[in-house]
């Protein structure tokens, strides 16, 4: 049973283009120095933003992993060697590059914009031989369910068009009404939460924007919310059916 909390100071930091793009990494690369290392079939998670003006990360290659981008604020643009054109994504949109046997891409984060880039391990020993593919998904294509005190947007899961090879992945954005909440959990899954905005009170800890929470082997979670809490949530298998890249080489 485990609830682990990582505030911004415990996450790895990064930047591109002399600080034109800034990053905090809940799950950094092994050499990045953050507290949390890859787990389940999540390999990497970066929260990247432009503090002022747009900036571009030039063309670079990927193989094997599924590289997902989620636009949190503003807009981003992507270019890849398969589409061979720039495509703009706006707040709430998502993209997946199933990088397979190889693809190159570039990305531009526009003025005052923010994105998550998250790498999933789809069993690289198999995907490394498959052709690369690419998909964009508009926010309007994701189902939204409103209950009494929460609103859930399903990015990857039931009735969502989002497709990926990485097993057992569910992705949600959840908005909570202020107050007390009880969430039932599946003890066979790992829950990864990023606080997009607002405050979450767990036991005696008041957690704010940018805090990352990893939960495993728990059946329920009690907490209180304030200031219009929004969470980005990923559910992944406690034990993937295949050895992950990180397990094989660390």
Image (cartoon, grey):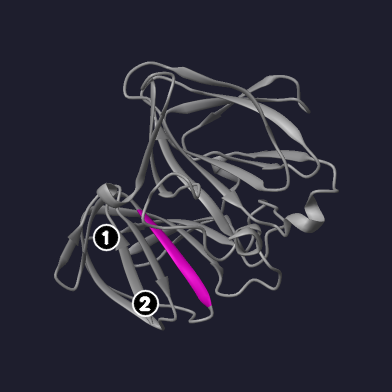
Q: Is residue 68 magenta?
A: no
- Packing grade of label 1 (10 A; few <14, some 14-19, many >=20) is some
Side of 60 where 213 appears, left or right: left
Q: Can you say whether 106 is above or below 217 in the image?
A: above
- Residue 170 vs residue 242, the one in the foreground: 242
Asked whether the residues under the numbered discs 1 and 2 touch, taking CB atoms below 8 Å apart as contact, a structural biologist would say no
What residue is at 63 percent from the left and 58 percent from the top?
249
Which residue is tagged 1?
177
Secondary structure found at label 1: loop
The picture places residue 192, in percent across and down from the top left corner, at: 44, 62
N-term mark: 1 or 2: 2
In this rendering, the count of numbered labels is: 2
Which residue is tagged 2?
2
Q: What range of the chain is rendered magenta?
A: 189-194
The picture places residue 36, in percent across and down from the top left corner, at: 41, 58
What residue is at 60 percent from the left and 46 percent from the top?
141
- Residue 15 vs residue 108, the one in the foreground: 15
The picture places residue 126, in percent across and down from the top left corner, at: 81, 57
Q: Can you say whether 155 is above or below 17 in the image?
A: below
Q: Can you say whether 95 is above or below 160 in the image?
A: above
The picture places residue 5, in percent across and down from the top left corner, at: 30, 63
Q: CA distance from mark 1 to mark 2?
A: 26 Å
Q: Can you say whether 3 is above or below 144 in the image?
A: below
Q: Which mark is residue 137?
A: none
Secondary structure found at label 2: strand
């Amino acid at each position: 049973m485990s609830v682990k909390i990582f505030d911004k100071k415990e996450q790895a930091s990064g930047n591109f283009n002399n600080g034109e793009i800034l990053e905090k990494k809940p799950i950094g690369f092994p050499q990045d120095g953050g507290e949390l290392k890859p787990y389940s079939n999540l390999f990497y998670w970066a929260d990247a933003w432009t503090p002022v003006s747009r900036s571009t990360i030039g063309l670079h290659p990927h193989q094997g992993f599924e590289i997902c981008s989620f636009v949190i604020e503003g807009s981003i643009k992507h270019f890849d060697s398969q589409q061979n054109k720039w495509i703009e994504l706006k707040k709430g949109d998502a993209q997946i590059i199933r990088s397979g046997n190889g693809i190159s891409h570039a990305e531009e984060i526009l003025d005052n914009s923010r994105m998550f880039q998250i790498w999933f391990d789809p069993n690289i020993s198999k995907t490394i031989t498959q052709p690369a593919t690419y998909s964009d998904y508009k926010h309007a294509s994701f189902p939204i369910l409103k209950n009494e005190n929460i609103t859930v947007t399903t990015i990857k899961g039931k009735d969502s068009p989002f497709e990926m090879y990485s097993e057992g992945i569910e992705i949600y954005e959840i908005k909570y009404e202020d107050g007390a909440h009880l969430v039932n959990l599946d003890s066979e899954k790992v829950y990864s939460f990023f606080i997009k905005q607002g405050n979450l009170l767990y036991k005696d800890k008041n957690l704010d924007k940018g805090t990352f929470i990893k939960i495993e082997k728990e059946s329920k979670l009690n907490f209180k919310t304030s200031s219009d809490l929004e969470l980005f949530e990923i559910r992944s298998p406690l034990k993937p059916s295949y050895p992950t890249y990180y397990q094989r080489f660390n």
